[in-house]
Image (spheres, rainbow, N blue to C red):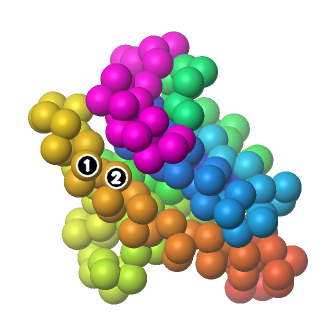
Amino acid sequence: MYRIATVCTGNICRSPMAEVALRRAFQNAKLADHVAVDSAGISDEELGNPIDPRAQRLLERVGLDPHGHSAQTFDTEWFSNHDLVLAMDVQHYRALTSMAPDDQARAKVRMYRSFDPAVAAEAIESQGIADPWYGHAAGFEDTWEMISEALPGIVGHVRDQLDRGNPTGSED
């Protein structure tokens, strides 16, 4: 089983949106039996809270069910049982790479949008997804668009790793 974690600040907006989007993308790609997706926050400030209502409404509108989500905090143990850790912005990327116990764990951390061809070649500072929590519903629409644009790249990457029998993506 290939395991992915999407990570944002509080695990109530961006990362759970990405989590459910990825689950559907892997289901559509007929990979749902081979890929598991989790989400977490780097902070415990929202621990146990449900998904933000604005994110919930957007996900329901596009046919996804975010019910049952409960915010959790990223645990360093996840490095040992996840193959890919996707940071939603640069702050998360830096926090995750500093939490990583070794180079192998650090290599699992990628920016979520590094799989979006429109920004993949840009510096990580240009690959972040701004936190929509502080704004209005339109910010959630922008977030959803950025999440959606990276989905094919993530699915393709995971498919390649599974086909090569190399879930961690290392070149060895």
Amino acid marked by disc 1: Glu
Q: Which mark is residue 144?
A: 2
Q: CA distance from mark 2 to mark 1?
A: 5 Å
Q: Amino acid at mark 2?
A: Trp
Q: Is residue 147 magenta?
A: no
Q: Which residues are magenta?
A: 44-64
Q: Is residue 55 something that shows in the picture?
A: yes
Q: Which mark is residue 164?
A: none
Q: Are marks 2 and 1 in contact (CB under 8 Å)?
A: yes
Question: What secondary structure is found at the residue carrying circle 1?
Answer: helix
Query: Closest to the observer: 170 or 7?
Result: 7
Looking at the image, residue 96 sits to the left or right of residue 120; the answer is right
The residue under the point 13% across, 35% down is 135
The residue most toward the top is: 48
Closer-to-camera residue (28/42): 28
Q: Which mark is residue 141?
A: 1
Of all residues, the one furthest to the left in this rendering is 135
Bin the neighbour count of mark 1 within 10 Å (Cα to Cα): few under 14, some 14-19, many 20 and up.
some
Where is residue 99? Give x, y as percent: 51, 44
Q: What residue is drawn where x is 43% and y is 25%?
A: 51
Name the quadrant containing residue 119: bottom left
The part of the image, by quadrant, that contains residue 14 is top left
- Using a 10 Å C-alpha cutoff, classify the residue at mark 2 as few (fewer than 14 neighbours), some (14 to 19) or many (20 or more): many
Residue 46 shown in magenta: yes
- The x and y percentages for residue 92 are 37, 47
Q: Position of residue 132 (x, y in %)?
A: 22, 40
